[in-house]
Amino acid sequence: MTMPFQVTILGSSSAMPTSEKYPTAQVLNVLGRFFLIDCGEGTQHQLRKNRINYSKINHICISHLHGDHFFGLIGFISTLILQGRKNELHIYAHSELQRYTKFQLEFLQMNDPGFPIIFHPLNFKKAQVIFEDKKLKVTAFPMNHRIQCCGFRFDEQAREANIIKEKIKEYEIPIREIKHIKAGADFICESGQIIPNSELVIPAQTPRSYAFCSDTAYYEKMIPALEGLDLLYHEATFADEDLKIAQETYHSTGTQAAKIASLSGAGKLLIGHFSTRYKTPDAIFSQAKAVFPNTEIAQENSTYQI
């Protein structure tokens, strides 16, 4: 049975919400672990619309401190307080967000939220593992924006192969040998016969991966952190004809997002964070697809399986 590894797009607009789109927010479900990635205005509404239980979100990653990426956070925390949450909430962000959030809670007379809020400051100089357990590893890595900004990579941990139960009985495999076989060893019977590992196990599923890159100028230095991804979300704020504006504001064009996907060997590219100056993202999409054919527009309220 394949366990879930999927991202739901809650918001994909840049700078300002529109009548049709919300600022940046995504939820990644990795094997039942829910990570909220950025938290723009309207995130709570979108969570409800997509029937995602607030209480399942124990980790929040905030890429940078521009309002369209975190203005929804205090409202989300306030709702958790009203719901009587008890579990820890981990927030991975610029260290200044802790001070800002503390002030807001004090102002709202919510000094004691009733559950631990644990802040983890990001490193904006080099890639750093910010969360890891037996099933998942999360790495934050610096990008190139007007202010300090990080992207996030999520990697499923490699799993052991599953031994075929019937083979244990057939070859009288001792329990002490099962661990070695799962790790890739052949089995030698008492008669000296060698049973190849491939006959004894069902190979584990190849680990899956996803990365989130918003906001950033074209930045090849982050490619080592993106190598071999199954799915890459990369901002594509501007069309090629507005390259100068993209450079001035430290954002990317669709073509540049596609180049990053190509150079990093990504399997698929999602683009979003389109400037509201465009009535449709068609031109940006066409320009990206010309460079990296397996490109899609990130559609709000859509879930992408990885």
Image (cartoon, rainbow, N blue to C red):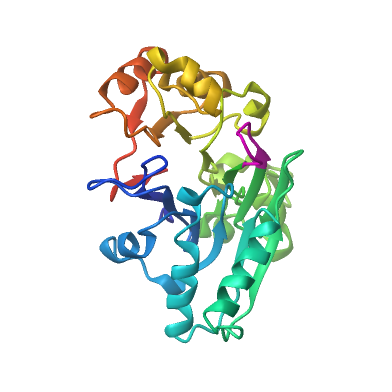
Residue beneath the point at 48% across and 82% down: 81
**Residue 226 placed where, x, y %?**
60, 32
Magenta residues, dominant SS class:
loop
Q: Can residue 178 be seen in this view?
A: no
Residue beneath the point at 63% across and 26% down: 223
Residue beneath the point at 70% across and 45% down: 185
Q: Give the answer, above or below, for where 220 lies relative to 27.
A: above
Q: Is residue 86 visible?
A: yes
Q: Quadrant of residue 217?
A: top right
Q: Nearer the viewer, residue 175 or 11?
A: 11
Residue beneath the point at 61% across and 66% down: 90
Total tally of numbered discs in the picture: 0
**Residue 167 placed where, x, y %?**
54, 54
Q: Which of 214 and 295 is in front in this view?
A: 214
Examine the structure image and report whether residue 220 is included in the region drawn in magenta: no
Is 228 on the left-hand or right-hand side of 193? left
Give the residues in magenta: 141-149
Q: Give the answer, above or below, for where 266 lies relative to 97.
A: above
Is 43 on the left-hand or right-hand side of 192? left
Q: Give the answer, above or below, for where 261 lies relative to 200.
A: above
Query: Which image quarter holds the C terminus?
Result: top left
**Residue 115 placed where, x, y %?**
59, 82
Query: Which image quarter holds the N terminus?
Result: bottom left
Give the residue furthest to the front: 107
Q: Nearer the viewer, residue 80 or 129?
A: 80
**Residue 48 placed where, x, y %?**
30, 66
